[in-house]
Amino acid sequence: MRAIAAPHVSPFGGIDSYRAAYASLTPADAEKTFVVLGTSHYGHPDRFGLTRKAFVTPFGETSTNLALVDEIARAAGDGVLMEDYCHSIEHSIEFQVVFLQHLFGANVKVLPILCGAFSRGMKSGAQPDDDEAVRRTIGALGEIAAREGDRLLWVLGVDMAHMGRRYGDGFEAAADRGEMEDVARRDRLRIERMEQGDAAGFWEQVRENRDHGNDDLKWCGSSPIYTFLRAIPDIRGSLLHYQQWNIDPQSVVSFAGMSFHT
């Protein structure tokens, strides 16, 4: 196994999907470096955010693999930024660190990477890595993935659709009912592209029915997913658990637990 995808939604709502993803890991994975690709909610929309700082949680302090951070920074140039502040307030990676610490202890090694929203690619109709800086960064990740092989385990901290009043829609969303049944159908079409390792097909579905350049399902995880599928092109995935959760009485978030193999 090369990777898992887990939510970054509140564990109160997403625990079944977190459980499905992290149950795929084994004690033998403890010595690996976990490359955590998280949605960047606060950073540059067309760049990747790195940090050299450690993550401190109630479980203890987990260090970042500085050698790999430095390698990416050298290879990617202006494709990456040191976004320490964004990492300090960003839950998409921090939640994954907490689960990894719970399984393997605070000494686990991570390579945390925030992925911008690829807004240029969304608006222009291009693939995200038509942008040279994005392509250079994904290329650096691909070289590291090929060289390090199973010494790395990739973790995607990703949510999927965000629907209902909270997110600007003109309807009240209820998990697994009404409009959310069609959302589940469309979510699963995207998940199928993930399972096939089809980055281009996945991005085309993300851009389907876009509104003013935005994904109408408001998937909060498209950029980490695309980055991962491009970096490891021979990857194949398996859906472990899909669910929808009412984050409030009028709004729903969808997410899943997945595993990936070569």
Image: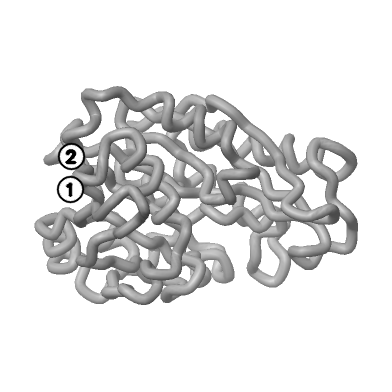
Q: Check the picture and name the quadrant holding the N terminus.
A: top left
State the image coordinates of residue 51 (x, y, percent, origin top left): 26, 67
State the image coordinates of residue 239 (x, y, percent, origin top left): 54, 27
Query: In which quarter of the view is residue 151 placed?
Result: top left
Label 2 is placed on what type of residue? Ala
**Dot 2 and dot 1 residues touching (CB under 8 Å):** yes
Given residues 25 and 163, the one toward you in this image is 25
Q: What is the number of the mark on residue 146?
A: 2
Q: Check the picture and name the quadrant holding the C terminus.
A: top left
Image colouring: one colour
Given residues 209 and 75, the one toward you in this image is 75
Residue occupying the point 40% across, 72% down: 86
Q: Residue furthest front?
A: 58
Query: In which quarter of the view is residue 80 placed?
Result: bottom left
Q: What is the number of the mark on residue 182?
A: none
Label 1 is placed on what type of residue? Glu
Left or right of 41: which side holds 243? right
Left or right of 81: which side holds 195? right
Task: Kindly identify which residue carries mark 1.
Answer: 143
Can you see residue 229? no
Please tell me whether residue 203 is drawn above or below residue 167 in the rendered image.
above
